[in-house]
């Protein structure tokens, strides 16, 4: 799951980022409201952690601008303001949850898991299924009822993304934005390499699932057709 963290206190932002990365989340950071909004409008994030008191553009205005552009990314407001009036403003502006500083790490992670479940996104502690394969995004284990193999974090993220799309084609550009970030220096070759790795591991598992290529368009995850279906 890719999270956008918009927090101007750089030491706190780095600390939160490290906590999330240890839970196998991918984290992009922004330290002002304008940059945060620019990132959010890319619509590549599964969840956003947004501070209210930000330079250049405050968090409430960022949130209103996002929602006006139909960006439905779940937003957890993170701020030192704990008064009821401030919470109401945040929720009325389109926030999905509210957490005041200081906070316990366990509560932050619990709220992230709750928002993920609410929006039907990836939850790191849950298994994902497609055809006869099961992917555990927490342990990075991919298996069938007969075999199991360990994936790298990037392989797991890519496979989970394709599984969530349920057979829809994903372009290399979309995959790069989703997995590496819209301002990443990753190239098409990076995607091709990880697609190749995943195909080899699916073959090893004798999976009834394949990654198909539509030339010039992108990749999709599909269940193999049996002879009786042809």
Image: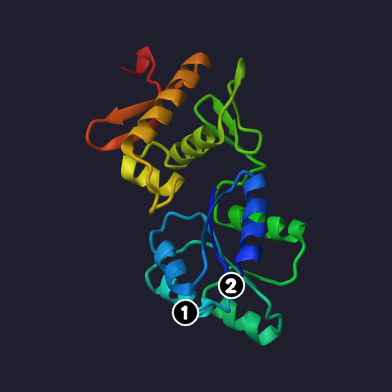
Q: Say what secondary structure mark 2 lies in.
A: loop
Can residue 167 be seen here? The reply is yes
Tell me the number on the disc at residue 51.
2
Q: Where 147 falls versus 180 (above or below)?
A: above
Q: Where 184 falls versus 37 (above or below)?
A: above
Depth check: give the residue in front, 191 or 142: 191
Q: Say what secondary structure mark 1 lies in.
A: loop
Left or right for 141, reference 164? right
Q: How many marks?
A: 2
Depth check: give the residue in front, 162 or 150: 150
Which residue is painted at 38% across and 59% down in the image?
42
List x then y, in percent, for residue 149. Answer: 59, 21
Tags 2 and 1 touching, CB below 8 Å: no
List x then y, in percent, for residue 177. Answer: 39, 49
Left or right for 176, reference 50? left
Which residue is painted at 58% across and 77% down in the image?
52
Kindly identify which residue carries mark 1: 57
Query: How many angstroms separate mark 2 from mark 1 (CA)?
Result: 11 Å
Left or right for 135, reference 165? right
The quadrant where residue 14 appears: bottom right
Can residue 171 be seen here? The reply is no
């Amino acid at each position: 799951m890719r999270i956008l963290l918009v927090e101007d206190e750089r030491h706190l932002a780095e600390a939160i980022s490290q906590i999330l990365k240890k839970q196998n989340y991918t984290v992009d950071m922004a330290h002002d409201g304008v940059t945060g909004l620019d990132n959010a409008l890319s619509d590549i994030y599964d969840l956003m952690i947004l501070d209210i008191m930000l330079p250049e553009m405050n968090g409430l205005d960022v949130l209103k601008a996002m929602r006006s552009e139909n960006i439905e990314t779940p937003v957890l407001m993170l701020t030192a303001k704990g008064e009821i009036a401030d919470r109401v403003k945040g929720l009325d502006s389109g926030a999905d949850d509210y957490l005041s500083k200081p906070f316990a790490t366990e509560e932050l992670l619990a709220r992230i898991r709750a928002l993920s479940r609410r929006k039907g996104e990836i939850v790191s502690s849950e298994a994902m299924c497609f055809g006869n394969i099961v992917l555990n995004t927490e342990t990075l284990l991919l298996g069938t009822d007969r075999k199991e193999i360990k994936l790298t974090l990037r392989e797991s993220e890519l496979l989970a993304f394709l599984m969530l799309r349920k057979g829809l084609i994903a372009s290399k550009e979309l995959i790069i934005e989703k997995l590496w970030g819209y301002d990443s220096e990753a190239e098409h070759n990076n995607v091709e390499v990880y697609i190749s790795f995943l195909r080899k591991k699916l073959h090893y598992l004798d999976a009834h699932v394949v990654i198909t290529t539509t030339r010039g368009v992108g990749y999709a995850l599909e269940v193999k057709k049996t002879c009786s279906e042809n």
